[in-house]
Image (cartoon, rainbow, N blue to C red):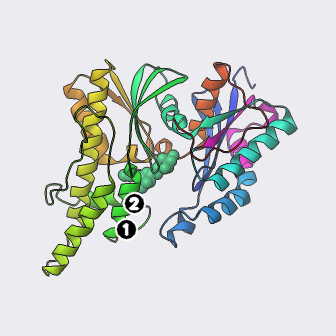
Amino acid sequence: MLDGKHLTLGIETSCDETAVSVVADGRNVMSNVISSQIAIHTEFGGVVPEIASRKHLESINAVTDKALQDAGVSIDDIDLIGVTYGPGLVGALLIGVAAAKAISFARDIPMVGVNHMHGHIAANYLEHPDLEPPFMAVVVSGGHTNIVNVPAYNKCEKLGETRDDAAGEAFDKVARVIGLGYPGGPKVDKAAKLGNRDAIAFKRVYLEPGSLDFSFSGLKTQALNYLNSERQAGREINVNDVAASFQEAIVEVIADKAVDAAVRYGQKKIVMAGGVASNTRLRELVSEKAAAADIEVLRPSPVLCTDNGAMIASAAYYAYMAGERSGYDLDAVPGLEF
Ligand code: KG4
Ligand code: ZN
């Protein structure tokens, strides 16, 4: 407790960012330190789990110290520790969970394990001080694509999910196929701005009528088939056009289903979350379609869309206020469901 504020230390190590943050009262970011491993994994064209774990282990103490220092607080001022315990890479998650347990035990600070996906949604509480449930959430990340009804702070009802690849995974795969490299999402986003989104008719996959599920695995094959046929015909490939057309096929389906879900459940707000929520065109299209249905759209700034410790701190704070506590038997759960 510092000046009457409840301080949460949020620890996130589920994938390729070692991230620690101090958040006051679940809403105010006092520090947000993110040590990205992107440069290391770029060499291999994607995240190498073994390397990720090792890097988390090397960085976690320094990142934690810097988060406290940036916030101008000491570990003794911290009231709660929030840590991601799943879903994610098991070795990577274990580093964060072990660090959280060690601090919790040594300093006798309560600890709450956080579902990474709940954290992504909570990023919006940091960005929008007045935001409160109920709302419809669209969580689009490298590992997940979910439509989630959020009736209260500590309740998440999953209404739809991907049946194969996540949206971010599709971005990353197609980026690789068209030679844009890793991480694919931001590169496709940038290239698409220079391309024509109607150039190539990639199929929009809506599944059964009324379904809020997604399927993106066919897009990579479609992109590959297109590239092969163009090459065989001796035509030059316009990477920007491929990026723009492919991106449109993904974001149009997400935007349609998000608005459909909000309308069906009577929600007046759509909250976007996850790395792909920083996609320029997705933001634009969801806003357009939601406005037509008189629905407000909220999303975090890009730095809070991708993995960070602040979102984990916020989710931990609200879980703690609802009575949740984790014991020292807290374990990493790589396949943790929503
Ligand atoms: O949420 P996140 O940081 O990590 C996971 O929990 O997965 O999301 C990472 C994913 C990656 O697949 C990345 O390519 C994608 O988000 N991404 C984007 C953009 N920025 C990040 N996808 C499309 N457009 C972007 N601007
Ligand atoms: Zn994430």
- Label 2 to label 1: alpha-carbon separation: 6 Å
What x and y, as percent, mark residue 59?
70, 57
Which range of residues does the magenta coloring cover? 63-86
Q: Which residue is mark 1?
A: 176
Q: Is residue 179 left or right of residue 139?
A: left
Q: Is mark 1 within 8 Å of ligand 1?
A: no
Q: Nearer the viewer, residue 263 or 23?
A: 263
Q: Which residue is mark 2?
A: 172
Residue drawn at (67%, 45%) of the image: 332
Residue 273 visible in the current orientation: yes
Q: Is residue 292 left or right of residue 17?
A: left
- Contact between labelled residues 1 and 2, with CB atoms less than 8 Å apart: yes
Q: Nearer the viewer, residue 267 or 292?
A: 267
What x and y, as percent, mark residue 190?
32, 58
What x and y, as percent, mark residue 182?
44, 65
Q: Secondary structure at mark 1?
A: helix
Q: Is mark 2 within 8 Å of ligand 1?
A: yes
Q: Nearer the viewer, residue 98 or 244?
A: 98
Q: Secondary structure at mark 2?
A: helix
Quarter of the figure with the N terminus: top right
Query: Where is residue 317, by image quadrant?
Result: top right
Q: Amino acid at mark 1?
A: Arg
Would you place residue 10 above or below residue 25 in this image?
below
Magenta run includes residue 67: yes
